[in-house]
Image (spheres, rainbow, N blue to C red):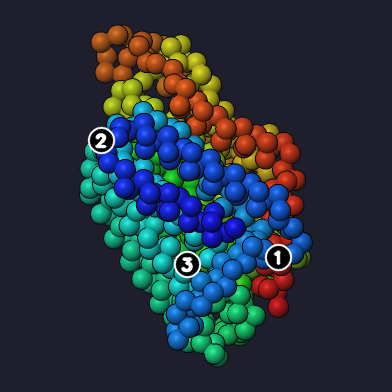
Amino acid sequence: MLSLIVFLPLAAGGALAAVPASAGRRVFVWSWIAIAVADFALVVAAWIGYDAGTGLAYEENLRWIPSAGVGYHIGLDGLSLPLVAMTSLLFLACAVYSLPQTQRTKSFVLLFLFLQTVSLGLFTALDLILFFVYFDLSIVGMYFVIAGWGHGNARRSALQFFLYTFIGSLVLLLGFIGLYLAVEPHTFDIVALTRANPLAGGGVYGGLVLLAIGVGLAVKTPTVPFHTWLPPAHTDAPAAGSAILAGVLLKMGTYGFVRIAMPLLPDTWRHYAVVIVVIGVLSVLYGALVALAQEDFKRMVAYTSVNHMGYIVLAVGAAGILAGSDAQARSLAVTGAVTQMVSHGLLTAALFLLAGIFYDRRRTYDMGAYSGLAGPAPVFAGTTALVAFASFGLPGFSGFIAEFQIFTGSLASATVATALAMLGILITAGLFLRVLHRVFLGELQVPDSPGAARGFTDLRASETTAILPLLGLAVVIGVLPRFLLDVIEPAATTLIGLISR
């Protein structure tokens, strides 16, 4: 069943590749929607059948390159299942949002089906080389999305994205090889490496392996100072590309911390946990402050991603500090980190899809070009306001649940850092309120101005159908989070047990 979930989009894409482009754009987009619906239904069935108390489920372990200790090993647990579900939902939302797509529609759809398989594959991978293959292929797929369907300096931004993240992936591979060489018999299997704990005691070798893995994952996350590829990539990418880049691809970095770095290098992780906490706080504050200075709506949302991913890094770092905290608090921090991955995926993807509406209507993201949009586009204004409130952690939304757990779990072991990070909420609240006032609540501009609000059309059916379910799920998680937390908490507790051994 799990292989079917992962490879259904790719297999369907292969079938669609045989359909001539002359069949019309609607054939390809509606086929994409049907495939995404089928894949999401399979993920929902897997969620319903998952028993949170049993650890890994839907496991498949086949020989692939046995002479090198590489296998096709996949499975789901409470750390990966929420991200698989989020991924399938976001690709479905992007498929619906792309109904009006007219530019080389066939290639666009095939690329996104490829990216869906790659993303689902990474979150299910239980072998380091399998993880690395998906990690690298995601870079290739997103490069072509940005370069082929972006705007502005799209090719330059795509190249910068590719070079940064590809170099990061090579450093990551060095770390994986270091783990492989440290265990007898040699293997890249994550489950076997977790049991063996080959670098127990840390030491210089363990520190170098963690440095390589940490840098590779930090570039993808991204954290300060490895974030500079992110704003131009987001600004110049098409809306659907930005939504997948922020909602899914960035999570590959933070997921790598909880799936690989923490359980496979527990002693070294504990030793350098304070450094990780500091990096997390710097990302939180830097991302929020730089976002506050932006005049470009899409670029501002990109920097808030740096801010929100910093909360996750803070939480996983605090989970490694044993002094001053107990296992329950550390487990809460990890639970909050995974919940934040899901919440950020839903809300930031929604924000980037909303940003695409600015460009679709007026070909600019400059907030100075808009004013008074709440008049002609009340649904657009209301939806943007709700997503903005959710993004800075207002109670009743998923962001509050995630950040409350992160701060509560991190406060005992990283008191000063957590207190500083809480300033990030205040700053992001201020910047979003400033945007809402300037863009939606000001006076209508004169009709002949470049960004005149008069004539600015409200959300179309495809846009509403794509965005509102993401916001709706964020509300469900914010009000009734148990269905999600019951899945994550047992896996977080198991992870903390591995770190504390």
Residue type, numbered disc 2: Ser
Assign the N terminus to one quadrant of the image.
Answer: bottom right
Residue 262, visible in the rendered structure? no
- For mark 2, give the secondary structure: helix
> What amino acid is at disc 3?
Phe
Name the disc covering residue 131, or none.
3
- Residue 202 shown left or right of residue 20 in the figure: right
Amino acid bearing label 1 = Gly
Residues marked 3 and 1 touching at CB (< 8 Å)? no
Identify residue for label 1.
55
The residue at the point 43 percent across, 40 percent down is 32
- Between 159 and 463, the residue placed more toward the observer is 463
The answer to whether residue 392 is above or below residue 71 is above
Image position of 328 with respect to 269: above or below = above
Residue 465 screen position, x and y as percent = 51, 28
Q: CA distance from mark 2 to mark 3?
A: 37 Å
Q: Is residue 285 left or right of residue 476?
A: left
Query: What residue is disc 2 on?
Result: 22
Q: Residues within 10 Å of mark 3 (few under 14, many from 20)?
A: many
Decide which of tag 2 and tag 1 comes sooner along the chain.
2
Q: Residue at x 25, y 10 (%)?
A: 448
Quarter of the image holding residue 28?
Answer: top left
Q: Is residue 241 visible?
A: yes
- Residue 458, quarter of picture: top left
Q: CA distance from mark 3 to mark 1?
A: 19 Å
Residue 317 in picture, x, y percent from top left: 59, 63
Q: Say whether disc 2 or disc 3 marks the residue closer to the N-terminus.
A: 2
The outermost residue toward the bottom is: 184
